[in-house]
């Protein structure tokens, strides 16, 4: 078969790998001038670094298996992380379960309740029993008190904004499962994974293997239209870097674009289109600062305070060696927000004026003169909002157009989106498509 793939992120590249391993010909179109999608990198301190902070958990099995398959398994290294939580005007160490028991911002009995609550959710095996409740309902009604007010309510509002009370409980359940898997015992520190050479190590090798098998990857080549004849996809029209529109025929088209932009490139029946557009996405804006010294001693800082205009501080070089970045300290300031939010449209300087005055809350000595370089990135489809009972609302990978498939982050469930799950989805959809084609041939034979 000749398969056209739209998007060279984790899902598109992985599907292309599996198609090409079975002898199919793949052509990938990528709108951006780089591969890797949301996990792509920029050069920071002379080395590649993800535009948005990235790490892996010990139960991210699909990506670990893929790395082995393509011969870069040895590049994955594990590091202990240090976690802090800013609440009530102070930073608390929340690295281990024992630290949580010492979290002075809430009374002792409520800390114990918080730990027992996490254990209880961690023991739930079947997420389906949680599907009809929101995470906010569970946290408010079943945990409640100061643990909800001081920690969870601000974190939920910070992450999901106006959607904070609509997120299905399976999201919280999957977060707890992942965190427990990455942490050993009450004193255990969380171990997080990061590949030597950044996530580029994985995407560059995928590219090399796909190309060695005859696959093509066209960067800066957005697909503008999917050709359809008799309700069957027949190919794509893409705009090449030169500006020229080129049409190419395919036996199968696999799209990995976000749900909100899929209807822009293909005419879809109303019921499927509604399913796609019913899922909201939050965008992310991420500022990377290269500093001449560390801001804090933590890798990950949760910010449970709505007066601070960003959700998290991720100090990359508090977990990874700063020597990789010419000795600079790398700090991400991250935020999720609606694409219609005025902050999303702000210039880099406006964002800095908004954010930087708050850094003194984490280190009173912080001064703008510590900043050696600034990188600013915006991701439009960063976080799908997954509501209650979503298993009944997920858009099908098989679209109503024959030979046209969709695989994007709104179809990952019950887990939260992540590179591991896009890789798992890329593999599953490649298998699904190859099985469907075998089935079609059987009908014809
Ligand atoms: C700030 C941030 C932090 C994150 N942190 C982590 C983390 O720590 N660990 C983790 O595992 N995951 C993390 N993730 C999530 C992870 O990066 C994504 O879930 C994953 O990379 C999505 O891969 P994908 O292939 O499904 O989609 P994408 O990466 O979005 O790929 C889709 C591709 O399609 C392309 N495209 C769109 N329209 C067209 C078109 N018309 N024509 C051609 N190409 C098109 C896009 O340019 C893009 O490259 C993070 C994400 C963000 C935003």
Image: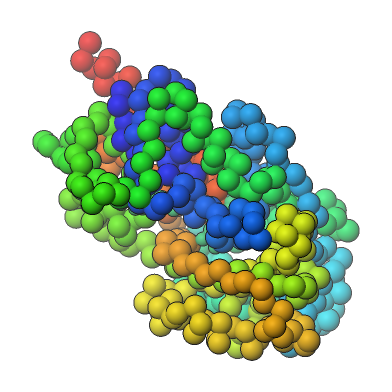
- Taking the spot 52% from the left edge, 70% from the top edge, the residue there is 376
Horizontal relation, residue 363 to residue 222: left or right: right
**Image x and y of residue 304, in percent:** 66, 79
Q: Quadrant of the N terminus?
A: top left
Q: Is residue 287 above or below residue 199?
A: below
Left or right of residue 285, residue 430 in this image: left
The spot of residue 201 in percent (x, y) is: 61, 41
Task: Indicate left or right for 370 with 267 as reference.
Answer: right
Q: Residue at x 32, y 59 (%)?
A: 260
Q: Which residue is depicted at the point 39% across and 72% down?
A: 339
Quadrant of residue 84 within the rendered picture = bottom right
Q: Position of residue 357 (x, y in %)?
A: 64, 89
Q: Nearer the viewer, residue 215 or 426?
A: 215
Q: Is residue 54 visible?
A: no
Height in image: 319 above or below 15? below
Q: Total marks drawn?
A: 0
Instruction: Work out which residue is located at the far top of the displayed protein and give it.
Output: 445
62 and 140: which is toward the camera: 62
- Give the x, y percent position of residue 393: 37, 54
Q: Quadrant of the C terminus?
A: top left
Of residues 98 and 219, the one nearer the viewer is 219
Is residue 359 at least partly visible in the picture? yes
Q: Is residue 181 above or below residue 426?
A: below
Residue found 44% across the figure and 23% down from its top? 213
Question: Dividing the picture into quarters, in which one does residue 44 lie?
Answer: bottom right
């Amino acid at each position: 078969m000749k398969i056209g793939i739209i998007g060279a992120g984790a899902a598109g590249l992985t599907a292309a790998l599996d198609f090409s391993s079975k002898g199919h010909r793949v052509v990938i179109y990528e709108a951006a001038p780089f591969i890797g999608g949301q996990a792509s990198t920029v050069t920071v301190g002379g080395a590649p670094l993800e535009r948005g902070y990235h790490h892996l958990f010990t139960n991210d099995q699909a990506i670990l298996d893929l790395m082995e398959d393509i011969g870069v398994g040895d590049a994955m290294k594990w590091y202990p992380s240090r976690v802090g939580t800013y609440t009530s005007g102070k930073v608390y160490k929340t690295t281990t379960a024992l630290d949580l028991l010492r979290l002075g911002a809430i009374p002792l009995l409520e800390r114990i309740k918080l730990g027992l609550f996490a254990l209880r959710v961690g023991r739930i095996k079947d997420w389906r029993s949680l599907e009809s409740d929101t995470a906010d309902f569970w946290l408010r009604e079943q945990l409640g008190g100061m643990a909800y007010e001081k920690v969870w309510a601000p974190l939920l509002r910070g992450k999901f904004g106006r959607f904070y009370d609509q997120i299905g409980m399976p999201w919280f359940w999957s977060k707890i499962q992942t965190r427990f898997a990455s942490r050993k015992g009450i004193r255990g520190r969380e171990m997080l994974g990061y590949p030597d050479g950044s996530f580029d190590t994985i995407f560059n090798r995928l590219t090399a293997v796909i190309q060695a098998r005859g696959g093509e990857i066209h960067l800066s080549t957005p697909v503008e239209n999917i050709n359809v004849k008799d309700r069957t996809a027949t190919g794509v029209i893409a705009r090449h870097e030169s500006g020229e529109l080129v049409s190419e025929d395919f036996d199968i088209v696999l799209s990995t674009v976000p749900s909100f932009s899929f209807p822009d490139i293909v005419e879809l029946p109303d019921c499927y289109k509604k399913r796609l557009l019913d899922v909201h996405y939050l965008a992310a804006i991420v500022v990377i600062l290269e500093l001449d010294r560390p801001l804090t001693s933590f890798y990950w800082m949760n910010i449970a305070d709505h007066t601070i205009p960003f959700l998290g501080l991720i100090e990359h070089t508090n977990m990874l060696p700063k020597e990789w970045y010419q000795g600079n300290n790398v700090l991400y300031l991250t935020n999720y927000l609606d694409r219609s939010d005025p902050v999303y449209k702000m210039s880099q300087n406006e964002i800095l004026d908004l954010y930087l005055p708050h850094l003194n809350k984490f280190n009173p000595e912080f001064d703008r003169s510590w900043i050696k370089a600034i990188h600013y990135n915006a991701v439009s489809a960063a976080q799908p909002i997954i509501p209650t009972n979503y298993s009944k609302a997920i858009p099908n990978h098989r679209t109503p157009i024959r030979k046209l498939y969709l695989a994007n982050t709104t179809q990952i469930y019950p887990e939260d989106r992540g590179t591991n799950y896009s890789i798992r989805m890329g593999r599953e959809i490649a298998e699904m498509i190859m099985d469907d084609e075998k089935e079609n041939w059987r009908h014809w034979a």
